[in-house]
Image (cartoon, rainbow, N blue to C red):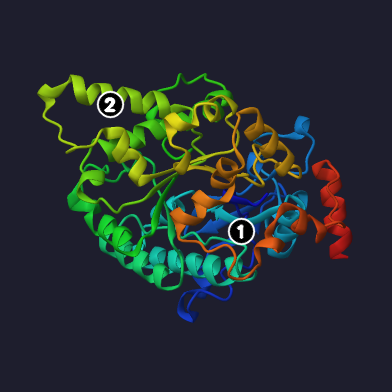
Amino acid sequence: MILISIDDHVIEPRDMFDAHVPARWKDRAPKSVLNEQGIERWQFEGIESGSGSLNAVVGWPKEDWGMDPTTYSEMRPGAYDIHERVRDMNRNGILASMCFPSFVGLSGGFFQRSTDKELALVMTQAYNDWHIDEWAASYPGRFIPLAIPPIWDPEALADEVRRVAAKGCRAMTMPELPHIQGLPSYHNLDYWTPFFNAASEEQVVMCLHIGQGFAAINSPPDAPIDNLIILATQVSTLAAQDLLWGPAFKEFPDLKVAWSEAGIGWIPFYLNRCDRHYLNQTWLGHDFGDKLPSDIFREHSLACYVTDPAALKIRDEIGIDIIAWECDYPHSDSIFPNAPEFVHAELTAAGCSDEEMAKITWKNTSRFFGYEPFVHIDQEAASVGALRALARDVDTTIRTKHEWRAMYEARAS
């Protein structure tokens, strides 16, 4: 078995900006600051953000999970240390990983909030340079680099797509529903055409990660956190609607979208509904040519899931060539350290053939992102078994955050 995770996360290390911000801007770069409560928060131009809570609970007992902020000292080091991350990937049998951001927000909204947009662009580019040139490049072939966007400026956004593409980055994380962030929706081609053009021409995948558009659901004020965790994947349907039934997919046939951590269970119902609507509500004048809306969706999409046992049984209704697995390390949904056993059991229960398993676990991702998995690593060395053989000394003991802190302080001393 070969595993590629097309959705993991990085807890950005404290020194990430040190080597990537031009000298004149260094004093204004974001900094991780320990506050009076002993919690580390990223600070930038009066804006604060953290990286803790459910974002980094891998290695903790489940009963200790929660929304309380935390510090690097309480995390499993693989959350923020590139070398420990690769060791954990080896132990989990994972060849390659795409890592979404944490403190800057899933589509760089942290920098969007800055009033100094020149400075915000500098920091966005510094973030991308760190991610591409330092985090991903530290272990060639083990990471699929991902950029964040300067979404407040369409031309700067298009330029950044082309700049990161020239550095070998073929993915950019974008808002699910930009109107939730105070920007024009994806229906507005006047605003988004520069990005759609650049992404199409450079074959940079538009990654829409769940969690950004939750405000579209008008939940009651006393709704529990369960609503956010369970319903976040449903927002992907709203984003799909804007792109499929708006002008984007029609006007930009080469635009590629990854539905990151969105699951796949919503897709069969949604596509059935789309096709029925198109064939039945002809008075609305939609024209998909000689194709159905479901065909167009599949041409543009990669559907990413952590676990979805029911939907995998109807994988042909989704499209076996557009399904991709993800691990979600180090979040609370992550499957570690036994992802291979978990994934194999789930795919076997769904009746998947060996070739279908290979498509879901690595082939579809490689094709969609233009990632060549065996350039730096021979295929024989990329298997779960070969990677695990490199990681026999990796400790996977579950520890409380206090125990992690004690270990951290012991290493520091």
Give 168 or 219, whichever is nearer the viewer: 168
Q: Which amino acid is tagged 1?
A: Glu
Task: Identify the residue position indicated by label 2 in the image.
Answer: 275
Task: Identify the residue position indicated by label 1 in the image.
Answer: 12
100 on left or right of 113: right
Check if mark 1's residue and mark 2's residue have beta carbons within 8 Å: no
Is residue 370 visible in this depiction of the protein?
yes
Quadrant position of residue 309: top right
Coordinates of residue 256 in the picture (x, y in percent):
36, 51
Q: Residues within 10 Å of mark 1 (few under 14, many from 20)?
A: many
Q: Which amino acid is tagged 2?
A: Asp
Q: Residues within 10 Å of mark 2 (few under 14, many from 20)?
A: some
Of callouts 1 and 2, the N-terminal one: 1
Coordinates of residue 159 in the picture (x, y in percent):
31, 67
* Residue 401 tag number: none
From the image, state whether disc 1 or disc 2 is nearer to you.
2
Q: Residue at x 40, y 68 (%)?
A: 165
Quadrant position of residue 375: bottom right
Q: Up-down: is 371 above or below 262?
A: below
